Image (tube, rainbow, N blue to C red):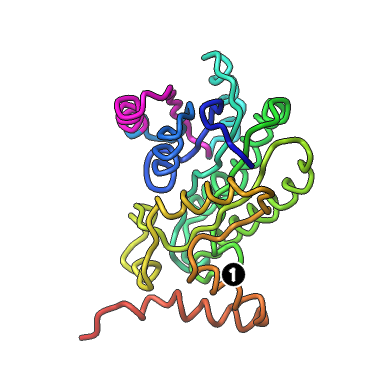
Amino acid sequence: MIVDYRSQTVLLTGAGSGIGAAFARALAARGASLVLVARRADRLESLAGELRRTTGARIETIPADLSDPGAASALRRAVADRGLHVTSLINNAAIGSFTTFAEADPGQLAAEIAIDAAAPVQVTAAFLPQLVSEGNGFVINVAGVTGYLPSPRMAVYSATKAFVLSFTESLWTELRGTGLTVFAVSPGATATAFTDGMGPDAAVLTAGGVRRPEDVVTTALRHLGRRDPGPTVIDGPANRLLVTMSRVMSRRRSAHLMSRIFDPTRVRPTR
């Protein structure tokens, strides 16, 4: 797909930091106009100011809490009220927790389902008619390697990413021939603030090394630029190898493997 980024207005959720901010910088540098969405208005404004100064791109910011069931409809109204015409969408917003399901806070788990699974569906549904009518943009859903694998201590987060993968693959099939490109990018451990607040046990998530947010974005945009992008792309050779291994294993063996990888005692200091 040959993308004329200068003709694109991209709505980007979870834009305040990490992979979202990296997407924003890469797209603005290519000439795209952006609608940045995140919960924290101060982070959005800081990033928007930076991008306006360094790229001259048109940047709009809309603070929103995507755990609110009415957030997608409110976001569509806010976009219309500003006279914006969104041509592309990146669903990147996500939260997670790292603890056994039995010990997890039910409210936190409900928020994970709302933001990580329900919001991509609702935001896509809110904007899809105009995206299809434009017919030259893209929808990128940020899934994750955990979507391919059982993930002890991240059971609900992992399940939401599996949901996003399945949803995206189905959408990719339905929208073939419309001119709208759809796919999911799946990062593994990435150097972001995602694990902040998850507690010391979450250190095991990055114990095997991390990719940079910019690496994830490069993988996604390179895939977007292919002649016929497939429905999914995995960031990083180690992550691709892990997923490939899981496909030849039984589900039982995959679960045991991930139990060892996510075992916090692997990185706890010995006394």
Q: Is 91 inside the magenta-drawn segment? A: no
Residue shown at the point (50%, 37%) measured from the top left: 13
Q: Does 129 sit above or below residue 215?
A: above
The residue lying toward the viewer, choosing from 226 and 143, is: 226
Magenta residues span: 44-66
Q: Could you tell me residue 142's position as x and y percent?
A: 55, 50
Write down the residue under mark 1.
Answer: 149
Task: Tell me where residue 146 appears, x and y as whole percent.
Answer: 55, 64
Q: Residue at x 54, y 35 (%)?
A: 68
Q: Is residue 213 above or below residue 130?
A: below
Residue at the spot 34% in from the left edge and 25% down from the top edge = 52
Which element is circle 1 on? loop
Where, by quadrant of the figure, is residue 255 drawn? Answer: bottom right
Q: Looking at this view, name the residue that lies furthest to the bottom.
A: 271
Residue 69, by quadrant, is top right
Residue 208: x and y in percent read 38, 73
Count of residue discs: 1
In reply to whether residue 48 is colored magenta, the answer given is: yes
| Quadrant where the image shows the C terminus | bottom left
Looking at the image, residue 43 lies above or below residue 22: above
Q: Is residue 199 left or right of residue 221?
A: left
Q: Nearer the viewer, residue 67 or 92?
A: 92
In percent of the image, x 48 and y 35: which residue is there?
65
Question: The disc labelled 1 sits on which kind of residue?
Answer: Leu
